[in-house]
Image: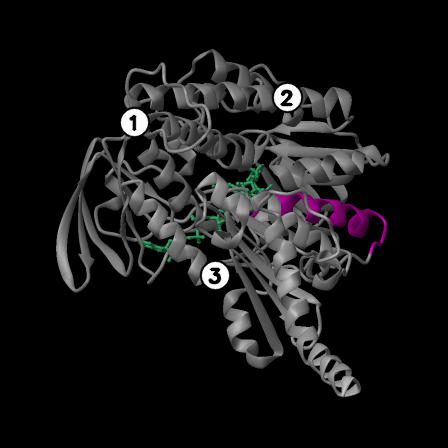
Amino acid sequence: MAHDPTTFAAVQPLDAHNRRLLETVHPPAWKDPVPPRDGYQLVVIGAGTAGLVTAAIAAGVGARVALVERELMGGDCLNVGCVPSKAMIAAARASHAAWTQDAPVDGDASLSDEGEAFRAAMERMRRIRADLSPVDGAKRFQDDLGVDVYLGDARFVADDAVEVGGARLKFLRAVIATGGRAAVPEVPGLADSGYLTNQTFYSLTERPGHLAILGGGPIGCEMAQAVARLGGRVTIIETGDRLLKNDDPDAARIVAEALKRDGVEVLTGARVDSVSGRAGSASLRVTHGGAGRTIDATHVLVATGRAPNVEGLGLEQAAVEADEHGITVDDRMRTSNPRIYAIGDVASKYKFTHMADASARMVVRNALFRGRGRASSLVIPWATYTSPEVAHVGITAAEVEEAGDEVQTITVEMADVDRARLDGRTEGFVRVHLKAGSDTILGATIVAERAGDLISQITQAMTAEIGLGKLGDVIYPYPTTAEAIRKAADQWRRAKLTPTAKTALGLALRLLR
Ligand SMILES: Cc1cc2nc3c(=O)[nH]c(=O)nc-3n(C[C@H](O)[C@H](O)[C@H](O)COP(=O)(O)OP(=O)(O)OC[C@H]3O[C@@H](n4cnc5c(N)ncnc54)[C@H](O)[C@@H]3O)c2cc1C
Ligand SMILES: NC(=O)c1ccc[n+]([C@@H]2O[C@H](COP(=O)([O-])OP(=O)(O)OC[C@H]3O[C@@H](n4cnc5c(N)ncnc54)[C@H](O)[C@@H]3O)[C@@H](O)[C@H]2O)c1
């Protein structure tokens, strides 16, 4: 049986936009189908990106498919992740530009203050989220794509059957795509402080007076900058010695500087010892730089990583193994039960929508058509949408350090790129890691205004096995920031050609004598 959708904390307030959203992602009057007696070829648990794409592709090739979702179709990305966060970021960027006249883009200067800008940004976000939702909606999946959609909690009751709302769904194959949720650290008093997570943050209608964010990962950095740019006071408290621990340290440094410029207080190497008070007024006891201090905040956002949704799934009944990182899978995304696969945030260290999407495409082939696709063969980029953005693909900075002389690194500063200078956006760089002695691209980091878009050129090259030298033959329109990639190729060529050129020149000079 479906839940009462109006109670979902992720979809508040119940204005026209959110009612429209619920109508598509958890229709209040939804009636589950009656399962066929001989069961399904594929049962998919969880209708986030991973589950939706799996179900749509499998039904598209003619399989009999059931899709089970206990909360909101679209999962984190549509409802409480990528979509609302990027809508907020766009509004905050425009508002910031209008207020500071800092950038050559149009902000809505008609808003009388930034508090109003926050309300408008959240309303705009709710409208766009509702506009985008039909593509993930229950009706579309059932009526247009031919997937049987069940709205309820799924639980394995055997190694070939799932139960939902009292109905038993037998399957030949199953895909677990139950995603994750915010992992909340054990800090005394935190549980009673009315803290926010990404699940509740996008239900805010009033700008936080002072937002304390635990965690300086992508969620912490993106939301800190958005709220600060909408005029809120923000403090990030990060236990590690820097922000964005999975990214290049130089990139993280630039983001930290940008956040500070926007008014965010960034405390790295800091620990929250206790929290007192509740929603609206919380006091955080923090140790930072060897000293204790108190931070009084109106709101606390917990963004300290993710925990996999594995509880209550009846994994033991299906002999599916899991640990604290999620469901254990092999390189073909198969669990310890050969009928059952697991993909997306519940089973991958790459917790991104595009990873969920790419694995879904692969898992359908593997599960239904004896495909041999391997997760390790995927070239996976990621981007953090701060200003400037940080985008990365391939070998990480830590792996580069470990590899030593086996990797050659080329860096082009944005300050040396004409377009970046013309735009007044000179912070950042393009950094490409090559297999030493060749132009084979092992990875890259880009820090720039649209780094998330630029990185695709490197990802394409890596996927198509095109070397950096060949990228140097590409003609880039002048003046564009993408020219930084050609400049990296030029740099590689100069380094490579110099000894040869020197020899040739030496020979030519000798002949002149
Ligand atoms: C704030 C934030 C911003 C993000 N921004 C980006 C971004 O810009 N770009 C990007 O690539 N990624 C981003 N991500 C990550 C992205 O949202 C996730 O990687 C993606 O949503 C994972 O998809 P999924 O299908 O694996 O899981 P989910 O989207 O979590 O979906 C899992 C679904 O399974 C359901 N479920 C769980 N248990 C059961 C059960 N027992 N029965 C039935 N249903 C169940 C859940 O209700 C949920 O709807 C962001 C995440 C957050 C939190
Ligand atoms: N643009 C994007 O693609 C995007 C945006 C947001 C989120 N995401 C996805 O969501 C995932 C979760 O994001 P996240 O930022 O929560 O996680 P994260 O794991 O990337 O970062 C969490 C940070 O919190 C810190 N931390 C841990 N415990 C702490 C504590 N008790 N106090 C203070 N700091 C603490 C960690 O050191 C780490 O730096 C990401 O890994 C990413 O895959 C992606």
- What is the x, y in percent for residue 87? 48, 29
- Identified at 64% across, 34% down, the residue is 68
The numbered disc on residue 207 is: 1
Residue at the far top: name it: 16
Mark 2 or mark 3: whose residue is earlier in sequence: 2
Q: Residues within 10 Å of mark 1 (few under 14, many from 20)?
A: many
Against 282, residue 316 (above or below) is below
Q: Which of marks 2 and 3 is in front?
A: 3
Disc 1 on helix, strand or loop? loop
| Residues drawn in magenta | 352-371
Q: Which residue in the protein does label 3 denote?
A: 248
Who is closer to the viewer here, 65 or 401? 401
Q: Residues within 10 Å of mark 3 (few under 14, many from 20)?
A: many
Q: Main secondary structure of the magenta part?
A: helix
The numbered disc on residue 134 is: 2
Against 444, residue 150 (above or below) is above
Res 313 quadrant in image: top right
Res 411 quadrant in image: bottom right
- The amino acid type, in three-letter code, at marker 3 is Asp
